[in-house]
Image (cartoon, rainbow, N blue to C red):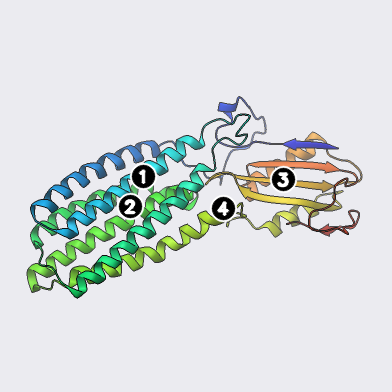
């Protein structure tokens, strides 16, 4: 029996591991370090805006501006959460946390989605109350303060737009800021309509529409982050294709105990038992398989165990015959 645990990820150098595979990380996604700047600027801009919005909301006696200031404060907390999760995720593992704290980025995305859904639910509830009792507002103050909000939230969202496809923690930050830009735009439109037509009902109606749009958009993030936090197979990986690849390898008779899960919001791990009666588990074979998994399936941390005859019962298959070319995983 031989086994290989290969780590091919962006902090190899921090762990003192050098690879001589000669492969570049093409087609492989990791949140670049430039996000540190994006988070720092985003947090600074948003804290400034919260203070401006709270002050003018208080001056204009505008409940909608004060409520939006409170909502923007929750965004600052969301950004701090996502940023700290990125830092925590880079901490090296120890005897108590052998994988380090990578899972923090998945949990941050999950909390971000929950906070956003609760905030939008509260906003929808407030909008329904406002529809029953419309409140006069200061349209001009609403417009220019919310206009600043569109600009600040739009710029912050743009910083995170690129990484949203490959990292759900970054996608959470992007969704949070983009939804805020929408909310602020709604306040601008409502303020304008109030000045022109005196429609005080448009403010709550606009709030309600925006809340429903954001809830629909955030639902996917909640579902995905919950799935990954429960060790689900990441959506971009087809487990059946990975299994087919293993079965196509020369001398592999069976595939047992195939597990694929997300270690963080941008790194994937795999463990598998390959039944190879000829015992061809030499380093060249393991290196080739490791590179193939990395380049074609975006899997960074494979642990491959080669056995000539299985000595453990194949999970969830009590009467498994290892010498038949079977397709087994769970």
First in sequence: mark 3 or mark 1?
1
Q: Judge from the rendering whether residue 270 lies leftward or rightward of residue 25; answer left or right.
A: right
Q: Judge from the rendering whether residue 67 lies leftward or rightward of residue 250; answer left or right.
A: left
Residue 88, position in %: x, y?
Answer: 48, 35
Residue at the image position 88 percent from the left and 59 percent from the top: 319
Residue at label 4? 228
Q: CA distance from mark 2 to mark 1?
A: 9 Å
Residue 176, position in %: x, y?
Answer: 35, 53
Which of 6/184 is in front?
Answer: 184
Residue at label 2? 177
Q: What is the number of callouts on the image? A: 4
Q: Are marks 2 and 1 in contact (CB under 8 Å)?
A: yes
Q: Quadrant of the C terminus?
A: bottom right
First in sequence: mark 3 or mark 2?
2
Residue 39, position in %: x, y?
Answer: 35, 40
First in sequence: mark 4 or mark 2?
2
Depth check, mark 4 against mark 2: the one in front is 4
First in sequence: mark 2 or mark 1?
1
Residue at label 1? 79
Q: Judge from the rendering whether residue 282 lies leftward or rightward of residue 18; answer left or right.
A: right
State whether residue 13 is above or below residue 216: above
């Amino acid at each position: 029996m031989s086994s290989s645990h290969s780590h091919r990820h962006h902090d190899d150098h921090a762990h003192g591991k050098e690879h001589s595979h000669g492969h570049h990380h093409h087609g492989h996604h990791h949140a670049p370090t430039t996000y540190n700047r994006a988070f720092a600027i985003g947090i600074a801009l948003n804290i400034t805006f919260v203070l401006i919005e709270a002050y003018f909301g208080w001056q204009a006696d505008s409940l909608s501006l004060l409520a939006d200031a409170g909502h923007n404060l929750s965004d600052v907390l969301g950004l701090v959460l996502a940023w700290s999760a990125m830092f925590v995720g880079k901490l090296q593992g120890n005897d108590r946390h052998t994988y380090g704290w990578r899972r923090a980025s998945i949990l941050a995305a999950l909390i971000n989605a929950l906070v956003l859904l609760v905030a939008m639910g509260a906003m929808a509830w407030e909008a329904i109350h406002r529809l029953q009792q419309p409140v006069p507002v200061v349209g001009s103050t609403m417009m220019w303060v919310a206009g600043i909000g569109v600009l600040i939230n739009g710029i912050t969202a743009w910083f995170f737009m690129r990484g949203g496809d490959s990292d759900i923690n970054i996608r959470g930050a992007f969704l949070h800021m983009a939804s805020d830009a929408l909310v602020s735009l709604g306040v601008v439109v409502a303020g304008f309509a109030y000045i022109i037509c005196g429609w005080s009902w448009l403010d709550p109606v606009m709030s309600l529409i925006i809340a429903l749009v954001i809830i629909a958009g955030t639902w996917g993030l909640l579902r995905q982050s919950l799935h990954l936090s429960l060790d689900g197979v990441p959506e971009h990986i087809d487990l059946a294709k990975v299994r087919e690849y293993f079965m196509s390898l020369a001398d592999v008779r069976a595939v047992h105990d195939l597990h694929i899960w997300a270690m963080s919001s941008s790194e994937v791990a795999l463990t598998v038992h390959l039944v190879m009666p000829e015992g061809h588990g030499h380093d060249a074979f393991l290196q080739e398989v490791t590179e193939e998994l990395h380049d074609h399936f975006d899997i960074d941390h494979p642990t491959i165990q080669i056995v000539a005859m299985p000595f453990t019962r194949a999970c969830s298959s009590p009467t498994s015959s290892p010498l038949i070319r079977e397709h087994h995983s769970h």
